[in-house]
Image (spheres, rainbow, N blue to C red):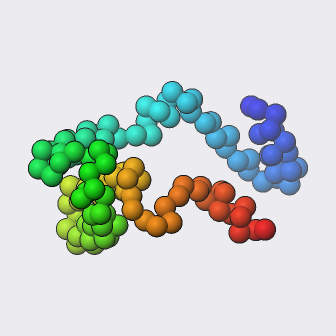
Amino acid sequence: MSIQFFFDNLWRWKCGLPEEEEIRMPSLEEMQRTQWLPAFEKAQRERLIMGAFRYGLNFTGNQNKSNYDRISSIIKRAELYKETGNDELLVDIANFAMLEFGEGIHPNKHFKTSAQTDKTERK
């Protein structure tokens, strides 16, 4: 029992309430092993490789590819997934999101975590 757990539950014991269970956080190694789906990543890579054969390489500065509207494709595939349940569409969505992240054309493209956004909005 950790000291923090003890103090968090002290008032519960005094009031006769049941104690909360101590939540054990898994190790970083365990989380790296369990918080990922290798089969999904494999499907993503396979689809990207097949797409490279069909449509050309990604992340190469190909001007024609960078003008492709990936956001609309993501929305379209999400709607199709909602109708059909075809997991292939989820792989496509993830790949389009990664490509947009890597070489997107959004005029306001940036990376800001929600924690950073929250701090900005509070000011």
Residue 78 seen: no
Comparing 5 with 66, the one in front is 66
Residue 98 screen position, x and y as percent? 36, 51
Please say if 107 is above or below 11.
below
Residue 36 seen: yes
Which residue occupies 22% across, 45% down?
57
Residue most toward the left? 54
Which residue occupies 78% across, 68% down?
123
Instruction: Please state the total of marks drawn on the protein image.
Output: 0
Residue most toward the top? 29
With 24 as the anchor, is 101 left or right in this view?
left
Residue 40 screen position, x and y as percent? 29, 44
With 99 as the anchor, is 110 left or right in this view?
right
Comparing 106 with 13, the one in front is 106
Q: Quadrant of residue 52?
A: top left
With 114 as the anchor, is 5 left or right in this view?
right
Residue 39 screen position, x and y as percent? 27, 40
Quadrant of the rendering where the N terminus is positioned: top right
Which residue occupies 29% across, 44% down?
60
Comparing 28 with 78, the one in front is 78
Which residue occupies 71% across, 64% down?
120
Please say if 26 is above or below 90.
above
